[in-house]
Image (spheres, rainbow, N blue to C red):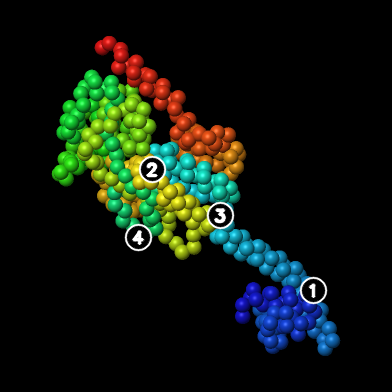
Amino acid sequence: MDRLQSMRVFIKVAELGSFCKAAIALEMGNSVVTRHIAELERSLGARLLNRTTRSLSLTESGQVYLERATQILDDLDELEHSLVARNHEPVGTLRIVAPVVFGLNNLAPALHAYAQRYPRVVPNVTLVDREVNMVEEGFDVGIVIAERVRSASVVMRRLTSGCIAVCATPGYLERHGVPQRPEQLLEHQCLSLPADQGGDAYIFTAPGGEAVRVRPTNVAFANNAEMLRQLALLGHGIAILPSYLIERDIASGRLVSLLPEYQLPCVDVHIAYPSRHYLPAKVRTFIDHLIEQFALQPAGAYPALRVAAMQAQATPPRDPLGSHARPEAGPPSWPRLTSWRADGELSHSFAETLAGCGGTDDHLRPTDRTEKIDAHWAAEADREADTPA
């Protein structure tokens, strides 16, 4: 018989002092109650109850068993209640992994809004530009940026998609000329991600539909798009970057968009999570929150999420849980800021971006904290352009 059920029957009999009353309370037959007690005593090898025709009392063993059984069932009930609550109420640590530039520019605003809605969830963020095995590394949610996604190991839900852009400073273009065709990039200093991140060659689609493949030869490489942006602002060359990263620079005139009639490959951005039937509420609500956030934006409003088009065009379909994966809470004062973690020296930048989304400066946009830095680099680039050779 069910041992836990037998324990519950025994406790009820001891509590009411009667087999008959216990049977009524438990909605069982008298014989069923009797069998539960008999089986319990047989398996324990000890008498738990003293029975007479008029009374029922606990033996010494019965008293010990009653105390321990009551504690065990109370603990079990508390555990079950806690697990049910966790699956229905968002609570606990939420481990998230995302590409670096996506995290700095897009994830922080979304996390700020999520944490305000669900203050009992503590996000733990890892920003990396490397292959990630979500299951082995214990992540609940990952951002995957790829041209095509093929995986039977995880559930993938699309957030958005977009392309990359080519740009340079007015000063650089004045000194070196403006490329009119993709092939002319071979005559320029280019700023690109390394080959293992898709920066080896770029496929441009001309207005007529023909594809033009260009592999720049005079290239300065960096494995971080923000680094390439800073070099571009210094007038170091022509950068090929996610459009979100340079849209404010182009709007302000600090950078000029090049080859606008040619299109570079676009990619989709997905949110990935281990495929399982019972998702904790913290995971379900975060997935729904991200999808809701980006669904509210008009097309093109979040080009930031197109960050890895460069990687995608040179990278085969990946399994986000396999060896080739590249995925690619609190009140406004953020008392748990140290709970937000980013690998290495990115921690400070991510925290600053997150603080810029709210906290004591709720009126600021996520990128406003970087305005002074951008202005500094723009001034440096202007001074360099004005300095006689």
| Three-letter code, disc 4 | Ala
Q: Nearer the viewer, mark 2 or mark 1?
A: 2
| Three-letter code, disc 2 | Tyr
Q: CA distance from mark 4 to mark 1?
A: 58 Å
2 or 4: tag closer to the N-terminus? 4
Disc 2 target residue: 302
Task: For the residues labelled 3 and 2, say whether their Cβ atoms are less than 8 Å apart.
Answer: no
Q: CA distance from mark 2 to mark 4?
A: 28 Å
Callout 4: helix, strand or loop? loop
Disc 3 target residue: 90
Q: Residue at x 38, y 56 (%)?
A: 156
| Three-letter code, disc 1 | Glu
Horizontal side of residue 94 vs 131, given as left or right: right
Q: CA distance from mark 3 to mark 2?
A: 27 Å
Q: Nearer the viewer, mark 2 or mark 4?
A: 2
4 or 1: tag closer to the N-terminus? 1
134 or 225, nearer to the observer: 225
1 or 3: tag closer to the N-terminus? 1
206 or 148, nearer to the observer: 206
Disc 4 target residue: 152
Q: Percent x, y for residue 172?
A: 26, 22
Question: Quarter holding the N terminus?
Answer: bottom right
Circle 4 residues within 10 Å: few <14, some 14–19, many ≥20? few
Looking at the image, residue 358 lies above or below residue 147: above
